[in-house]
Image (spheres, rainbow, N blue to C red):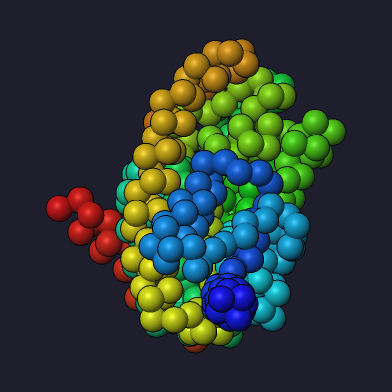
Amino acid sequence: MNNLLGRAAVAALITAFASEALATEWNVSLWGQRRAFTEHVHKLAELVEEKTGGAFTMNISYGGLSKNTENLDGISIGAFEMAQFCAGYHRDKNRAITVLELPFLGVGNLEEEVAVSHAIYAHPAVTEEMAQWNAKMLMTSPMPQYNLVGTGEPRDSLEEFDGMRVRATGGLGEAFSAVGGVPTSVTSSEAYNAMESGVVDTVAFAQHAHLSFRTIDIASWWTENLNPGTVNCPVVVNIDAYEALSDDERAALDSSVDEAIAHYLANYGELLKQWDSILAEKNVTRVTVPEEEIARFREVAKPIHDAWISDMASQGFPAQELYDLVQSTLDKERM
């Protein structure tokens, strides 16, 4: 009987060790803190763990694995298996997707942002460029159109943007530069200190980031309708890690993306509902930019689109095709 019990105990230990050895754990590099911008990553991890019975889990880290500006580099060397980054942090490394950061593209809501992002991510030119970093696009982190918070007197005309020091990256930075602004690309984590110390007068963020990075706490005004554009922030996975997954694990991951995005949209919708009361609570003045000023801004932005197409085409990218794909996807979404 003792021998039988002994053999049973050994068998149980072997089974336990085998199960542990077969388990897959991915490290995920994010930054800041858990917020609306990262809720889809948490939902994805939850769904994958559930679908695989705990055999595939994700260890989500906020800044403990890498700086936000170095997440794509970390993916390229396999320092972690999944990461989020924003195209504007290193435009030379992800040139094709910067089409999504052009100012005044006409994207009207988060659902349209998801559609155009995923259409661009699926384009062969993007797949090929990301593969140079051993990265595979998994999903977007859709953000609303950015708007400004600022200190001092409110600004609501192009003339008042002249000389304005603004935290804005990518195409947004180019747009403000075109009207005389002075953009700086400090990271989101540095934006509060830059604003508090007077390095910048204004910060361009989506609502969740104004909350998470506390720029709303020291702002005196917010532009509620400027809507000059947004940044594009994909979630990517290391190609080697992705290909090393079992068929079941890969299916669990791929099939969870749409549900994770749906969760993100629902969660962000709740935040937007609360935004008015947040502004009132913090005594932040809502600034409505006159439509004629926005129209002038759009006109100024048009040459930026043309310059992007020309520049990317000269580097061998199907630039016009990528630009047209954004417009055709928007048309399709609105049918």
Q: Residue furthest left?
A: 335
Q: Residue furthest front?
A: 1
Judge by depth and name the residue closer to the eye, 30 or 143. Answer: 30
Q: Is residue 47 left or right of residue 164?
A: left
Name above or below for residue 237 compared with residue 221.
Answer: below
Q: Who's the residue at 53% across and 35% down the image? A: 207
Q: Residue furthest right?
A: 197
Q: Is residue 163 left or right of residue 148?
A: right
Residue 9, how many percent across, how many down?
Answer: 60, 74
**Which picture quadrant has residue 268?**
top left
Judge by depth and name the residue closer to the eye, 21 or 228. Answer: 21
Q: Who's the residue at 57% across and 41% down the image? A: 35
**Which picture quadrant has residue 120?**
bottom left
Name above or below for residue 7 compared with residue 206.
Answer: below
Quadrant where the N terminus is found in the figure: bottom right
Residue 151 seen anywhere in this rendered image of the structure = yes
Judge by depth and name the residue closer to the eye, 195 or 208. Answer: 208
Name above or below for residue 172 compared with residue 66.
Answer: above
Q: Is residue 286 left or right of residue 322?
A: right
Q: Who's the residue at 73% across and 41% down the image? A: 191
Residue 88, how many percent across, how many down?
Answer: 61, 60
Residue 227, how many percent across, how many down?
Answer: 46, 39
Residue 105 seen anywhere in this rendered image of the structure = no
Q: Is residue 292 left or right of residue 283?
A: left
Q: Who's the residue at 54% across and 63% down the image? A: 57
Name above or below for residue 258 compared with residue 287.
Answer: below
Judge by depth and name the residue closer to the eye, 63 or 286. Answer: 63
